[in-house]
Image: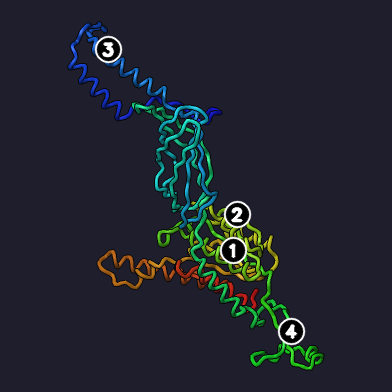
Amino acid sequence: MNQRGFRYRTWPVPTWRLAVLAALSALAILLLPPGWRVSVGLFQVSGAFLVVNAALIFLVGLDLLLAASPAKLDVQRIHPSSVTIGHEANLTWEVGQQRGRPGPVWLVDDLAPSLAADTRRVKLRVPARGVATARTRMRPKRRGRFQPSEVVLRTAGPLQLAYRQRRRFVPTRLRILPAFRSAKTAELVLRKARILEVGLRSAKGRGGGTEFDSLRELTPDDETRRIDWAATARSGRTIVRTFRAERNQTVLVLLDTGRVTAGRVEDVPRVEHAMDGAMLLAELATGLGDKMGLLAFDRTVHTTLEPSNSRSQRSRVTEALFDIQPALAEADYRAVMQHVLGRYRRRSLLILLTELGDEEVDQFLLPSIPLLVRTHLLVIAAVRDPELDRWAVEPSEGEEGAFLRAAAISEIKARQRTAAKLKAKGAIVLDHPPETFAAALGDAYLGAKATGRL
């Protein structure tokens, strides 16, 4: 690739018009008298043949000469820097030239199929000293980082007998962010939490659970233990203390991106459902004044987002997650637990988003839980495939139906055994289908605040 932005040259590409003209030329050769002949090796070529083909070659050469040079065209892509799955975005091509003849330009872009663009082939007419634009609409279906780098340009002269074609290097970057499918759920749960003042009514649990807010006069619904006797004596009225939920508590999401999270549930990888739950937790925690952080891990901890109560934390979580792909390897639970214990000493709510696999849990996760629950509150959440529940209750028809039902029942019992082992070690276990998974995470977080367990 040279400094002018193209990689290599190609031969002129003939068009259908040249094919038609060649056919008419052949017919003309047959109809014209042979005239003089020229010896070419062992063959005798008629003068009509030479004249007609010479004229044809001259026309093609002249047409190519009058066509704009693809190497001298300025090409740009204009698009948003990021697009969320489920949303639409426009991508615009701008093709211009500083000098040259006006003419048609055909452009083909190497857009990935998962961007679901309406088209990646456009035709423009570029003026002599100007810019032509074309637009397509994208509906991305897969998150990640996309880097379209090449476009193919074709130009033609007035007769359009042949194309001049070049492959141009036009790099760009486009980020496709994960969809926040539970956004409405997060809004409803957050509104409910604020209305009910979750966490204010109970201080029975470990950690105290309440913070003093203000003083006000007693109402019939207030508890007598909230009476501030010193303020009552000073004012001559019965005054009670009001409290607010503790803030600046830490919620740390541990996202498993190992092999088990690559499995698909409702045609979506498990890790995608887990990411949606992580974004919901970020929205809830920061909305209630708590800090939310994120660790993504497989063999090692590869993504770390420090806990923060900034209202932009959910956007940061989205940015941190958009190009994470499941690794085809087992997750190292022991390594991430050691990382958490060494770095986060203050009591936190740890939410591990993983899968309930017997072997991995028995070998790596169970031995680490007792050390964690001494300091932290641990929630282990997994996405259950709703097909399991359907197969387990559907009447079996034939050998295949009986096999599916038996396999589903066996898998459900295995998940229940795994959950029981984890609960016995002191963890809270959630196993929900995708439609209720994010809401269950939100309820677990709010329940921990309400009972003062943080």
Estimate the x, y position of residue 338 in percent, counting from the top left: 64, 60
Image point 30% across, 28% down: which residue?
Answer: 17
160 in relation to 390, above or below: above
The reply to whether dot 3 and dot 4 touch (C-beta < 8 Å) is no
Callout 3: SS = helix
Q: Nearer the viewer, mark 3 or mark 1?
A: 3
Q: Residue furthest right?
A: 234
Image point 54% across, 27% down: which residue?
Answer: 2
Residue topped by disc 4:
215
Estimate the x, y position of residue 315 in percent, counting from the top left: 59, 59
Task: Answer few, some or many: residues within 10 Å of disc 1's Cα (few below 14, many 20 plus, some between 14 and 19).
Answer: many
The C terminus - image quarter: bottom right
Q: Nearer the viewer, residue 57 or 62?
A: 62
Residue topped by disc 1:
253
The reply to whether dot 2 and dot 3 touch (C-beta < 8 Å) is no
Q: CA distance from mark 2 to mark 3?
A: 71 Å
The reply to whether dot 4 and dot 1 touch (C-beta < 8 Å) is no
Q: Nearer the viewer, residue 251 or 326?
A: 251
Residue topped by disc 3:
50
Task: Answer few, some or many: residues within 10 Å of disc 2's Cα (few below 14, many 20 plus, some between 14 and 19).
Answer: some
Q: Nearer the viewer, mark 4 or mark 1?
A: 4
Q: Earlier in the sequence, mark 3 or mark 4?
A: 3
For residue 303, which numbered disc appears in the image? Answer: 2
What is the quadrant of residue 200 in the picture? Answer: bottom right
> In the rendered structure, which amino acid carries the disc numbered 2?
Thr
> In the rendered structure, which amino acid carries the disc numbered 1?
Val
Q: Earlier in the sequence, mark 2 or mark 3?
A: 3
Q: Nearer the viewer, mark 4 or mark 2?
A: 4
Q: Nearer the viewer, residue 189 or 38?
A: 38
